[in-house]
Amino acid sequence: MLQNKHTVFDCAIIDLHKIHNDAGNITVVENGFNAPFGVKRIYYLYDVPGGEERGGHAHYQLEQLIIAASGSFDVVLDDGTNKKKVSLNRPNMALHIVPGLWREIVNFSSGSICLVLASHRYDEKDYIRTYDKFLKYRT
Ligand code: TYD
């Protein structure tokens, strides 16, 4: 499928298994098991000041899994036609973002950690940084 034909409805929540233990839980994301793509890069957002927003871009190729490793935030997805807001607030819940969608991450709770698993290494050329350019890409 052409990357610019993906819609917000292609982005699913993946219920990651929780290995429960009274001494603390473990959740695993593993290539070839429950990751929907091969994970090549991991990064995390933290110390986000109250009221701050992140994202505000799209990617041509990159797929991501976004997890609220701690606290909560909302991911607003936009395919140029439809918008969808997904609230993440459990470390065993991952949002799979397919390529070609505009995304904003908002409403970070204090001390939250946004863990991102990505399908490719960092490449600034894969970013669409302006909304105008994104809308042109989608048409
Ligand atoms: P960006 O992806 O725009 O952040 P966000 O979507 O969270 O608002 O990245 C912010 C800056 O960090 C940008 O200058 C590029 C740099 N960066 C890297 O060098 N490597 C990475 O893997 C990422 C995600 C960002």
Image: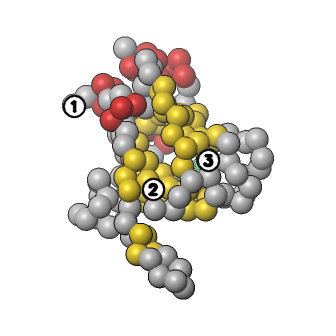
Q: Amino acid at mark 2?
A: Met
- Mark 2 vs ligand 1: CB below 8 Å: no
Q: Is residue 110 left or right of residue 75?
A: right
User: Which quadrant of the figure contains the N terminus?
Assistant: top left
Q: How many marks?
A: 3
Q: Amino acid at mark 1?
A: Met
Which of pointers 2 and 1 indicates the residue nearer the eye?
2
Residue 132 in the image: state x and y as whole percent.
Answer: 53, 17
Q: Observer-nearest residue: 94 or 32?
A: 94
Q: Which mark is residue 81?
A: none
Badge 2 is on which residue? Answer: 93
Q: Residue 64: tell me if it is visible.
A: no
Q: Residue 66: tell me if it is visible.
A: yes
- What colour-coding does the image apply? secondary structure
Q: Is residue 107 left or right of residue 1?
A: right
Image point 55% across, 62% down: which residue? 69
| Helix, strand or loop at mark 1 | loop
Badge 3 is on which residue? Answer: 73
Q: Amino acid at mark 3?
A: Phe
Image point 53% across, 80% down: which residue? 24
Which of pointers 1 and 3 indicates the residue nearer the eye?
3
Image point 64% across, 40% down: which residue? 106
State the CA–CA distance, disc 3 to disc 2.
Answer: 12 Å
Q: Residues within 10 Å of mark 1 (few under 14, many from 20)?
A: few
Of callouts 2 and 1, the N-terminal one? 1
Q: Residues within 10 Å of mark 2 (few under 14, many from 20)?
A: many
Badge 1 is on which residue? Answer: 1
Q: Are marks 1 and 3 in contact (CB under 8 Å)?
A: no
Q: Residues within 10 Å of mark 3 (few under 14, many from 20)?
A: many
| Helix, strand or loop at mark 2 | strand
